[in-house]
Amino acid sequence: RVVERTGGASLLANIALVKNNARIASQIAASLASMGGSQGFSTTASYSPETRTDQPLLVIGCAAIDITSRVDPNQSAESAIPEVDLLRQTKLAATSHPGTVFTSVGGVAQNIARAAHLLGANTVLVASLGQDAHGTAVAADLNRMGMDTRFLQYPGSGARTAIYNALHGPNGDLVAAVADMHINGLLSPQQIEEAFSSLRPRAVCVDANVSTPAIVTTLMQARESGACVVFEPTSVPKCTNVLSALLVIKHSHAVADVSSLVHMITPNSLELQRMSEAALELGLVEDVPTAATVSEIAKFHYSLDASVIRNLLTLFPLFPTVVVKLGEQGAAVISPSPRNATRPIIRHIQPLKPSLVENSSGAGDSLVGAILAQLHTRSELVSPDGSLSLAPQELDTIVSRAQRAAIMAIESMHTVSDRLNPD
């Protein structure tokens, strides 16, 4: 058990999480009950897109300003910063280094929406922005590229537009980052409900930056409208937010089987590990695959770490389709067998190699956006109840194609390459 391996520390942490869910549940109840009023929130419809007959792709979560700094790879060996030990080297960390600083529109949900939009999907972003210069810049950029901005929310009360400030080493890999993301928790369930009511989306992606009430509203609205739900875990500290939402729904008895609410998740290996541990501790899944089962599957996927296989199998009863972003190792995928939906099939998608590395921050978001664009443009892949109608080979092809968007992001200083296009 995870509790035994961590000496009880994980159990104590998740007991606190469970207790917190009781408080969250009351907040959700109050929030959902009061959706008829504005609660001081306002929206701006500065862009009115032409009427589209196809159901849109709805992306909910963080829009931000990205400030990306990269240390000059051409500086001398004596002055180059160590990739791993930067923050441990006081002298190096406490000084400046020659390099470049690049500012762009970012945020997980915005990146995903941008990639999907550039690839031809009719995409609508739901996000919170501050009434400041950064918020104005984000909205203007989205309007410029023709994205629907009717459901951007401006909470007011001095809320700042989210900022992600990242430092990359000479080889382009992330060294450290500071994320000012408080505003994402202010995205109201009402705003999400209004978007569903107006748009009736075919598919929806929600990132883990938003609050538990916002995720609960997303899942329940998607269930009512028959929309496919993709959850982007975002980070290790935030990836369990969807589990908190599922736990609240389960305890409210609003849905008999919460495993039907999220159709795909897209974690990296660390987020996958944390979600597996938390799902077990919270009782959302019960069984851990045996070592023999993991070992047998590993024989056919020797390039996949056994922990990835174990965690995929653990979460399969709750999340039937999982695409794990493995960076330079490609992706791991689990999905149901076409002949028996209770039987999982695990595959390893081989990686593509970039010709150069400029910025690795937006690769995962671009991958998810490209997956969503393909699901949106091929309506036959989503069943009327929102579940995926995908044979394993079809999903593997979709993920393989989506890797191209990730590679283009890596080769660009932009978090999402502006070279993406429907062709």
Image: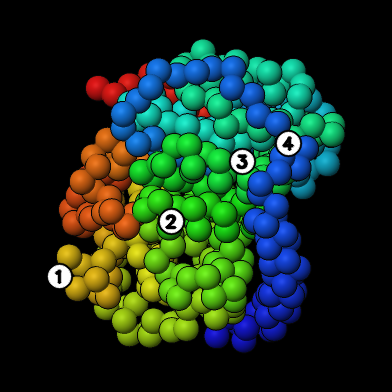
Q: Quadrant of the C terminus?
A: top left
Q: Amino acid at mark 3?
A: Gln
Which mark, residue 191? Answer: 3
Pointer 4 or 3: first along the chain = 4
Please report contact status of discs 1 and 3: CB closer than 8 Å, yes or no.
Answer: no
- Residue holding disc 4: 41
- Apparent side of residue 251 relative to residue 136 in the rendered image (left or right): left
- Apparent side of residue 361 relative to residue 16 in the rendered image (left or right): left
Distance of label 2 from label 4 (alpha carbons) = 24 Å
- Residue holding disc 1: 339
- Residue holding disc 2: 224
Please report contact status of discs 4 and 1: CB closer than 8 Å, yes or no.
Answer: no
- Nearest the viewer among 375 and 34 is 34
The picture quadrant where one finds residue 167 is top right
Neighbor class of circle 4 (other Cα within 10 Å; few <14, some 14-19, many 20+) is some
The picture quadrant where one finds residue 262 is bottom left
Distance of label 4 from label 3 (alpha carbons) = 9 Å
Residue, far top: 144
Pointer 1 or 2: first along the chain = 2
Residue 236 percent coordinates (x, y): 61, 57
Residue 330 visible in the displayed image: yes
Distance of label 4 from label 1 (alpha carbons) = 48 Å
The picture quadrant where one finds residue 92 is top right
